[in-house]
Image (tube, rainbow, N blue to C red):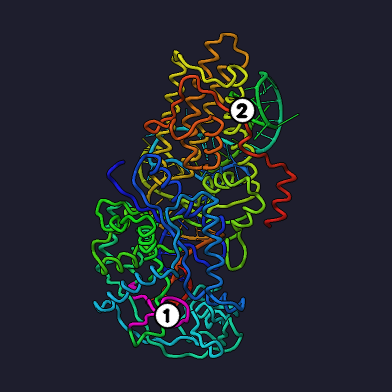
Amino acid sequence: MKNNKYIITAALPYTNGDIHIGHLSGVFLPADIYNRYLKLNKYKSIFISGSDEHGVNILIKSINENTSPVNIINKYHYMIKKNLKIFKISLNNYFRTSNKIHKKYSLKVFYKLYNKKFFIEKATYQYYDKLYNLFLADRFVIGICPICNYKEAYSDICEKCGNVLKIGDLKNPISILTGKKPVLKKTINLFLLFKKKYIIYLYNKYKKLKYNNKILKYIYNFIKIDINKRSITRDIKWGIFIKKIKKFNNKVIYVWFEAILGYISSTIDLSYKRKKNYIKYWKNKNTKLINFIGKDNIVFHTLFYPIIIKNYNKKYIIPNYINVNEFLKINGKKISTSKNKAIFISKFIKYLPNYIDSLRYTLISEMPINKDSNFTWDKFKNNNNSILIGIFGNYFNRIIVLLHKKFNGYIPNNIILTKYDKYILNKVNKFINKINKYILKYNFRMAINEFINISRIGNKYLSITTPWKEKNNENIKRSLYVSLEILKNITKISYLFLPYTYKKILKILNINKNNFINNNIIFPLNHKINKPKIIFKYITSNKLKKIKLIFE
RNA sequence: GACGUAAUAACUCAGUGGUAGAGUAUUGGUCUCAUAAUCCAAAAGUCGGGGGUUCAAAUCCCCCUUACGUCACCA
């Protein structure tokens, strides 16, 4: 085991629906690959996430569906948890913010900051729905924009002209819930102070830690536009109630104030489950904390989190790196859970259970690293057929079949390598180094691309050495031996990207944990491999048509 | 409106001052161990438009166009 410890976090998905391919591509897959890389290289790591189960959206959804918020979160929490498992996301703990442990911890932090007088009180006017006895978030009130007269402007922003509106500006406001006019009602809430000095301090710190430009510029913007406080309590009936403070005991903590603490409460939960103290990780200077998030919640990780946690207990660490991804689109259109425009994971698993790794491949190779990227079923088919079958699966199959035809499945040994063999193996090594480099730079797209390139080298080597028509037995042995060496490397790396395939390959190669010595696959003398089996399934044009019908 | 990000072959992208690159798709050839897969080759680009700096610009600077994102009670 190496000295550095890691905490890997994947942003908590909001539990108002199933997770979709955007969650996987933007957050869970990058985090998963990174964590798998750490495990493969014998680092100590914990990989945590959980469901974000509070907030006004879930409340609204429960009202619309005539059910309770608890029913909603129960339905989706277990669904998401199961789906993450099926996609082999290597989480150590998937927790939930409605759990007692989380509530207790969040309140502890909240009360401490309150007692330190870290919050300020401020009165504001807020739209209020009398029928439901509910304060309405700005987004749930629409009306006519006072500037451009757009009819469906939100009460805080008009999406047509882009102007930011103040509460009360909107003409003819209507509650989305009831279709009736809401009233403006005064309310007192608590606000978290964003001290400019501290933001500048964080900015410089992040710069030193080599956070990416996107984040630095985002924070720089915060310094410039003089944001100094954010409301951290809400007037709704769903969330973590602030019981102990009389004045606010009918209000809840703003969802992101507590959700951001979910990583820590998830760790507390893990500690109970395993009877081992993982909270130490959070207070150890040598721990590397890496957050994987989407671009929609930069502010909570870069500003909320350090402000909250350092004032609670300054021993807690802040992230060494925050990996921010953009959004994945489908056929050029934005994904939306609430508008039901997404490829949901449950549906994918139902109709295409044998294509989990194919989807993982496409989502990794299309990961929205620098800018929004696009998913199409044609790409999915193409990747599956041309890359996974044509290049990778085919290469694997060729070797296995040849080994059976030439040596009855026994692995050749006592080989003397030629210069060319050594050149090829050396080249493969260079690609492995590249893959490692790309992973450490969070460029998983390039990493998986280089991974496929190793199979390309292998295919080329085979077509040059042509063991199927070679007469000299030593040459055949050598060719297949070198091919197997390449295949060993591919196998090892497939653990990072394609977990199902990895297991299938191990089975066909007839090896288990005992064959791994110092991280290398070692075949014992006279080792016999199993019969070849198809590891990827072909997608015909007909099948593609059917898929499109189901999902589009 | 403010701020930010981007624009490179049909598609997806790599390329931060020195003769335009890769994969996919297309076309031709090759192999026959392999899931009509491999391998080789061809064709394909005024690097969004305009101006500037430079011996030299996809790359640096300025202006414009287009797309996308963020903008302090959505998460």
Residue A447: give x, y in percent of width and height.
46, 40
Q: Amino acid at mark 2?
A: Lys
The image shows residue A144, relative to residue A325, as above or below, that is below
Percent coordinates x, y for residue A2 in the rendering: 30, 41
Residue indicated by mark 1: A234
Apparent side of residue A104 relative to residue A501 in the rendered image (left or right) = left
Say which residue appears at 52% left-offset and 81% top-offset.
Answer: A147
Q: Secondary structure at mark 1?
A: strand
Disc 2 target residue:
A531
Residue B73, image x, y percentages: 45, 77
Q: Nearer the viewer, residue A164 or A116?
A: A116
Q: Residue at x 48, y 34 (%)?
A: A512
Type of residue at label 1? Answer: Arg
Q: Main secondary structure of the magenta part?
A: loop
Quarter in which the C terminus of chain A is drawn: bottom right
Circles 1 and 2: CB atoms closer than 8 Å: no
Q: In which quadrant will I find the N terminus of chain A?
A: top left
Q: Which chain does the residue under circle 2 lie in?
A: A
**Which residue shows up at 58% across the image and 17% down it?**
A407
> What secondary structure is marked by label 2?
loop
- Write down the region rendered in magenta: A226-244
